[in-house]
Every structure is written in structure tokens, then in C-alpha cells.
Amino acid sequence: MTDDLPDREPDLPSAFLDIPGVRNFRDAGGVGALRTGVLYRSGSFHNLTPEGAQRLKDLGLRTVIDLRSPFELATWPDLRFGLDHEALSLPTLPANREDIDRPWPEDQAELYPFMAETAGPSLVAAIRRLGTPGGVPAVVHCAVGKDRTGLTIAVVQSLLGASDAELMADFLLSNAGLGLLDGPTPYLDETGTERVSRPISTPLLASSLSWIRARHGSLADYLHAHGTTDEELTALRTNLSA
């Protein structure tokens, strides 16, 4: 889960923004009641350029929520170039890829329900920040902004009233943003190991949402089980709604 991938396709949907040094950067708004200009999604900032930082400053960026593991952050820390946003480390997955108790699934189909099982605390903390006055505009990112970011953004969009069809359509844009429209692409991960980045598909995100609904009934009940209050969900909707 890193961003050493081929250059993205030249003709991208209008939601994408050109932030030099940052992969797959786009506005998450316009889905459900989520307004544009308050929540963005992307890959990591470890290759951010000074020009890219200026463009982030122009967006009024106040928060960067980083879903990567501590090891990923230590290996490839985000660059700032004087940006004064608040950076939050909220790992979606267990901290260590090699943790013998909670190993990260290598199989993509297994990863998505696993993320739903482990992401609760990260999602709750992200929602609290996004509902805070002055917490937005914000960016949510992982390594390439595809899997971990995909689930987090889908949860927020769903809480803002997006249908599953809308969630899926926005989720799939990462295939264009990462040059994966023609299939899997090799890359080097944060340890220097060669891996394969695979395109995403609707059944992947659907498996995460199905895991949550099967065990908790709804996204709101899932978040409540991890400590979110109704007041915090209301604050999120107020802060992000069109």
C-alpha cells in the first residue's frame, strides 16, 4: 500500500485536482448531501512539492487525516512546506503488517471485511474531527487513497445521505486516478518489497458495508458501538452538508 505507481491517466473526471506530488487527489463532495470544497481524499503527501503545498494552502486546508500505519508514517512521512494544518494519525489497520495476532490480509477480497472489523476507532476519531468547527477543509489519505481511504470516505458520504450506488461510483474513480483502468500494476511498498496494486471493484466496498450492516444493523449503530454519539453525527452533518 504505497504510491510508487505509474502516472495517472491524463483525462480525469472534474472531481480530481492537480496537486503536484500527491496521487489520486480529488474532492469527495457532490455525493449525497456532502458539499464540495470541505472534504478531499488522496494518496500520501510524502512526495508533496512546494507547488503542491501552495495549492493545498489555496484550498484552505485545516486537517490532514492519515490512515496509514505508524511504520508507513515513519518510512515516508508527509511533507508540509510550511502548511499549518493539524495532522492526525488514525490507522485503519492494526499497526504492524506482521502482527501475528492481526495480520493484514494479502488477498484484496479479504482485506475489505477486515478493514470494516478494525476501522471503528479510526472512523470515530475522523468523524469527530470533521464535525469540529474549524476542522475543515480536510483531506483523508492513506498510501494511494484507494482502499483505506475508500472505506472511510464511503462511511462519511453514507452518513451524509449518499446511496450505495453513489458511494460505489465515487469509490471506483480511484482506478482512473491511479492508472489502474487496464489492470494490476506492480509497485514497491514501504519495505522495498515488490507487490501488485489491483484495481478496485464494487463488490470490495460492498463487502465492507455488508460486514458492518450484518453485525450492527446500520453504519450509525456500528459507529455508536465504537463510541460515537448522536450529537457527533449531527455535528458532522452540519459541518459538511450542502
Image (cartoon, helix red, strand yellow):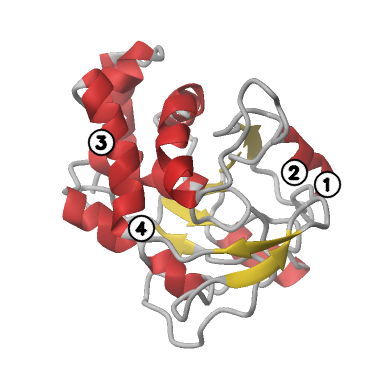
Please, what is the three-letter code of the amino acid marked with disc 1?
Thr
Please, what is the three-letter code of the amino acid marked with disc 3?
Ser
Separation of residues labelled 3 and 4 (CA atoms): 16 Å
Asked if disc 3 and disc 4 are in contact, CB closer than 8 Å, the reply is: no
**N-terminal-most mark, 3 or 4:** 4
Please, what is the three-letter code of the amino acid marked with disc 2?
Glu
**N-terminal-most mark, 3 or 1:** 1
Label 1, residues with CA under 10 Å away: few <14, some 14-19, many ≥20: few
Label 2, residues with CA under 10 Å away: few <14, some 14-19, many ≥20: many
The secondary element bearing badge 3 is classed as helix
x then y, percent, for residue 118: 49, 26
Q: Residue at x 56, y 79 (%)?
A: 8
Separation of residues labelled 1 and 2 (CA atoms): 5 Å
Separation of residues labelled 2 and 4 (CA atoms): 23 Å
Separation of residues labelled 3 and 1 (CA atoms): 33 Å
Asked if disc 2 and disc 4 are in contact, CB closer than 8 Å, the reply is: no
Please, what is the three-letter code of the amino acid marked with disc 4?
Phe
**Quarter-wise, where is residue 99 in the image?**
top right
x then y, percent, for residue 219: 26, 28
**Numbered badge on residue 210:** 3
The secondary element bearing badge 4 is classed as helix
The residue nearer to you, when weighing 144 against 25, is 144
x then y, percent, for residue 212: 30, 28
**Numbered badge on residue 75:** 1
Q: Residue at x 34, y 12 (%)?
A: 225
**Numbered badge on residue 72:** 2
Residue 92 against residue 144 in the figure, above or below? above
The residue nearer to you, when weighing 108 against 223, is 108
Can residue 234 be seen? Answer: no
Q: Which residue is identified by label 4?
A: 171
